Amino acid sequence: MTTTTAVWPDTAEITSPDAIAVLTNLRSLRYLRPFMVAPQTLSSAAAELNKPVSTVAYWIPRFRRVGLVEHLGDTTRTGMAMPTYRATARRLTVPFDKLPFDSRVELLDSGRMRVLRRFLDGLDEALEAEEAFSLAFFAEGEGQFAIDMVESDASRDQRGFTDGWRTFRLSTDEAREFARELEALIEKYGHDTGPRRYVAHMGLAPEPRHRWRSANDFGPP
């Protein structure tokens, strides 16, 4: 049996465009994951992924070529050498400004949208169950319209859910304080020990200077 005992770094910064392309692809990231948890042979990684060994073997040269996985050595069993691999660090970090725009949009938005859809599904079920809400449709401003949720004060006091999107003007200091307070509120209630699971959405962002994702939100004029 021949293996290396090199210390496994906690973090490695990834800046190579080829490595970033592999790391930000959700399909390849799925196959990289076992090697970020512990050193793996092809068979142990395949078992964790519930995939054929041949499929895992397909990815190893690609991970090694871009420096995301390293060969630790070979373990000999029943006369066969079994290579052992691990990720170059437990956590692989990419500076945000090194991420191509299209890659980071696809990667981050897909994750955000999965959770947002769960949030919206839960919100819809809760609203229907309350039987105390109405939608109000009305004109607002020049050529604008609005849709608002209407509920009684009694319902507002009793419900265990909320949703709302606002735009408003803040100073830089106020925005910093608002962001810290939101994070502190999540920390206060994020103990994850209650009897029922909830999905929380928390966010604050400046109005974009350039509209990429939202450019066609309302279709042609």
Image (tube, rainbow, N blue to C red):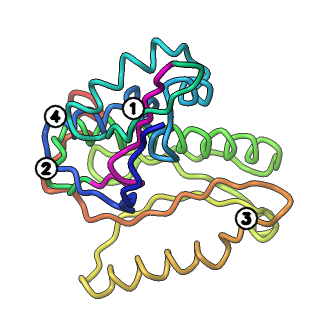
Whether the residues at callouts 3 and 4 have beta carbons within 8 Å, the answer is no
Q: How far apart are marks 3 and 4 (CA)?
A: 38 Å
Residue that label 2 marks: 210
Q: Is residue 83 located in the magenta-colored stretch of the structure?
A: yes
Nearer the observer, 59 or 186 = 59
From the viewer's perspective, is the residue at label 1 or at label 3 nearer? 1
The amino acid on which the numbered mark 2 sits, given as a three-letter code, is His
List x then y, in percent, for residue 86.
Answer: 41, 42
Whether residue 214 is visible: no
Residue that label 1 marks: 26
Residue that label 4 marks: 18
List x then y, in percent, for residue 28.
Answer: 37, 28
Residue that label 3 marks: 192
Is residue 201 shown left or right of residue 31? right
Which residue lies at the image location 62% right of the left edge and 25% below the top edge? Answer: 47
Whether the residues at callouts 1 and 4 have beta carbons within 8 Å, the answer is no
Lower position in the chain sequence, tag 1 or tag 3: 1
Q: Is residue 216 located in the magenta-colored stretch of the structure?
A: no
Span of residues in magenta: 80-93
Q: In this view, does 23 lie above or below 55?
A: below
Secondary structure, mark 4, is: helix
From the viewer's perspective, is the residue at label 3 or at label 4 nearer? 4
From the viewer's perspective, is the residue at label 2 or at label 1 nearer? 1
Is residue 157 shown left or right of residue 53? right
The circle on residue 205 is: none
